[in-house]
């Protein structure tokens, strides 16, 4: 891709700022963990429609990443332009060659996911996350924060992900259909995650409301006691992301708390995790990979859950009401 940012310039970057909307914002949230962990660069995240009107502080050694599948989202473009006017290097991560974002940015990284027809972003989310992982690895290397063996290991894991996504679809499909059948008449879904699982649950909840129209909320599991736990009763399905992560034990205690309130726990775990199998009413397992890459797999059962729930309710999954694929006005 057209990465005009030289290794020398990348070595001088002091902060990364990600601006995006919707699903693309969630992809950026995943990327934040990778860039901070591997490249030891601070990453600020902002919803583009907020960033553009906030009079943000932007420094010349900031790298501003605009993530936009279409490359035409008005708010993301405006946020990128603002950053560029104020002297930052602006990198667009987009799926569409020749889009406005490619013209407005200093550098471009293409996700090359192919045309996405459905309004709900799915494969483009996965490819945005993969692109940011690669960017994070590159930043870590040019900044000398990662050794060759670790890079080789992670690249090997990244290459195995397409196969593992297929395995996930094959192994979860039937079970997810059954879960969708039993909860499609529900009035609310709660999604919980923490650490690298938090962006996954935000994305899962967005998919659910977007195509099934069932209200859903996503929370950092550590926030439960600060309010959302009051929502729970025996009728509430609670989708918990409990795949491998540095704070899995904490997530599992949150799952146990939810379970103790009588809610129906649907947990996504990494294969072989007995704790997840023991705590959840329904456990869906994804293949093992490096914990930092788990979101790419963990999101798949959530996309399927939204899809089958919407289908069960007779919704138009490709063209949900009130939504456009590309939001070219604010
Ligand atoms: O084209 P963009 O990535 O800039 O679009 C941003 C959002 O409008 C988009 O991700 C939206 O949230 C999706 N339809 C969600 O599935």
Image (cartoon, rainbow, N blue to C red):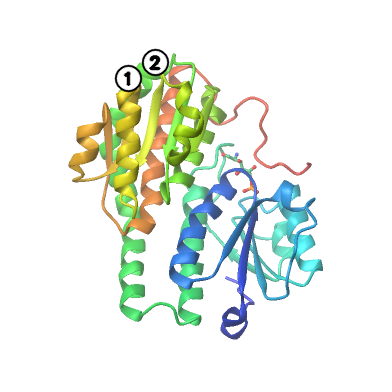
Is residue 258 in view from this perspective? Answer: yes
Q: Which SS class for mark 1?
A: loop
Q: Quadrant of the N terminus?
A: bottom right
Q: Is residue 165 left or right of residue 3?
A: left
Which residue is found at the position 80% from the left and 57% from the top? 55
The residue at which mark 1 appears reads as 262
Report crowding for label 1: few under 14, some 14 to 19, many 20 or more residues within 10 A (C-alpha): some
Q: Quadrant of the C terminus?
A: top right
Using the image as rendered, state which of residue 127 and residue 60 is in the foreground: 60
Q: Which SS class for mark 2?
A: loop
Single out the residue that lies furthest toward the bottom: 8
Q: Quadrant of ligand 1?
A: top right
Q: Upstream in the sequence, badge 2 or badge 1?
A: 2
x, y (%) of residue 237?
A: 39, 23
Report crowding for label 2: few under 14, some 14 to 19, many 20 or more residues within 10 A (C-alpha): some
Asked if ligand 1 lies within 8 A of label 1, the reply is no
Is residue 73 in view from this perspective? Answer: no
| Mark number, residue 222 | none
Using the image as rendered, state which of residue 104 and residue 235 is in the foreground: 235
Using the image as rendered, state which of residue 174 and residue 196 is in the foreground: 196
Image-quadrant location for residue 269 = top left
Q: Taking 26 as reference, is 67 above or below it?
A: below
x, y (%) of residue 243?
A: 32, 46
Which residue is found at the position 45% from the left and 34% from the top? 224
Q: Taking 312 as reference, is 113 above or below it?
A: below
Single out the residue that lies furthest toward the front: 226
**How far is the residue under mark 2 from the one under mark 1?**
8 Å
Q: Is residue 128 left or right of residue 232?
A: right
x, y (%) of residue 90?
A: 69, 67
The residue at which mark 2 appears reads as 235
Q: Is residue 86 left or right of residue 221?
A: right
x, y (%) of residue 192?
A: 43, 36
């Amino acid at each position: 891709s057209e990465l005009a940012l030289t290794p020398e310039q990348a070595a001088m970057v002091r902060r990364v700022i990600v601006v995006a909307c919707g699903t693309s914002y969630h992809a950026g949230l995943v990327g934040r963990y990778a860039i901070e962990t591997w490249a030891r660069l601070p990453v600020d995240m902002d919803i583009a429609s907020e960033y553009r009107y906030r009079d943000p502080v932007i420094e010349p050694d900031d790298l501003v990443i605009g993530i936009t599948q279409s490359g035409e989202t008005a708010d993301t473009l405006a946020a990128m332009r603002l950053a560029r006017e104020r002297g930052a290097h602006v990198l667009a991560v987009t799926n569409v060659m020749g889009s406005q974002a490619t013209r407005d940015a200093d550098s471009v990284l293409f996700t090359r996911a192919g045309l996405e027809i459905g309004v709900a972003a799915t494969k483009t989310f996965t490819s945005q996350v993969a692109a940011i992982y690669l960017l994070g690895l590159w930043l870590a290397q040019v900044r000398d924060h990662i050794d060759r063996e670790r890079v080789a290991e992670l690249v090997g894991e990244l290459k195995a992900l397409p196969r593992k996504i297929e395995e996930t679809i094959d192994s979860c499909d039937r079970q997810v259909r059954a879960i969708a059948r039993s909860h499609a008449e529900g009035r609310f879904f709660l999604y919980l995650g923490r650490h690298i699982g938090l962006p996954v649950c935000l994305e899962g909840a967005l998919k659910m409301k977007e195509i099934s129209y069932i209200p859903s909320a996503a929370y950092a599991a550590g926030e439960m006691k600060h309010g959302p736990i009051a929502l729970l009763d025996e009728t509430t399905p609670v989708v918990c992301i409990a795949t491998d992560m540095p704070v899995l034990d904490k997530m599992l205690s949150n799952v146990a708390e939810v379970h103790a309130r009588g809610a129906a726990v649907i947990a996504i775990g990494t294969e072989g995790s007995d704790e997840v199998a023991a705590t959840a009413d329904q456990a869906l397992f994804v293949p093992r990979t490096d914990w930092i890459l788990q979101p790419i797999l963990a999101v798949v059962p959530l996309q399927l859950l939204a899809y089958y729930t919407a289908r069960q309710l007779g919704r138009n999954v490709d063209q949900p009401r009130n939504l456009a694929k590309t939001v070219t006005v604010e």
